[in-house]
Image (tube, rainbow, N blue to C red):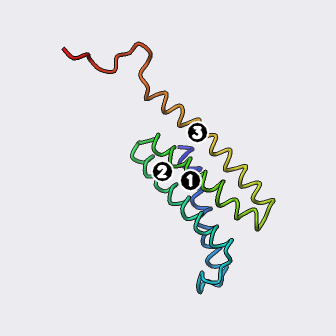
Amino acid sequence: GVVTAVFVFWVGTEILTILALVLGSGGDSIAHLSFVNVGSLCSTAVSTAMVVFALACLARGDRLAAYTWLARALLVSIFVTRVFSFVESQFGAVIGVGFDVLLLISVQLMAGQERRRAMPEPGERLSEPPR
């Protein structure tokens, strides 16, 4: 659905960011990257891997696990990747943080709905009492 499409797009942009960092260094070696670029590269790779894992969970039908991994990926993006982004471009980083926060709020709301669906209704028995 929409969640999958948004995060597939997000993964695509993150992969393009990784490629831009690596190829922007001349493509020969990442050894010439600055500390900020290496930090951004590593944190982007970690959050991208988390999103890919979350999309695999969604494909298996485990929405709660997927939302948990998506939230983790967004937290890495907000608290690690965007810190490095602020060093390079404050304006661009503000837009990125805003987008990440909106996604995080959405994912948290969807996870809450999923948890409520999994809970039994009040008065509903969880199992039969032993005899």
Name the mark nearer the viewer: 1 or 2.
1
Query: Mark 1 to mark 3: distance in Å?
Result: 12 Å
- Residue position marked by numbered label 3 in the rendering: 108
Residue 128 lies, with reference to residue 34, above or below; the image says above
Mark 1 sits on what residue? 73
Front position in the image: 48 or 60:
48
Tell me if mark 3 has few (under 14), some (14-19) or many (20+) residues whose alpha carbon lies within 10 angstroms of its own. Answer: some
Residue type (three-letter) at the residue carrying disc 1:
Ala
Residue 115's x, y, as percent? 48, 32
Query: Which mark is first along the chain, 2 or 3?
Result: 2
Q: Position of residue 39 (x, y in %)?
A: 63, 69
Residue in the picture at 66% in, 54% down: 78
Pointer 2 local density, CA inside 10 Å: few below 14, some 14–19, many at least 20: many
Residue that extends furthest to the right in the rendered view of this protein: 91
Instruction: For marks 3 and 2, give the CA distance.
Output: 14 Å
Percent of width and height locating residue 65: 45, 44
- SS label for mark 2: helix
CB under 8 Å between callouts 3 and 2? no
Q: Earlier in the sequence, mark 1 or mark 3?
A: 1
Name the element at disc 1: helix
Q: Is residue 35 left or right of residue 15?
A: right
Residue at which label 2 appears: 54
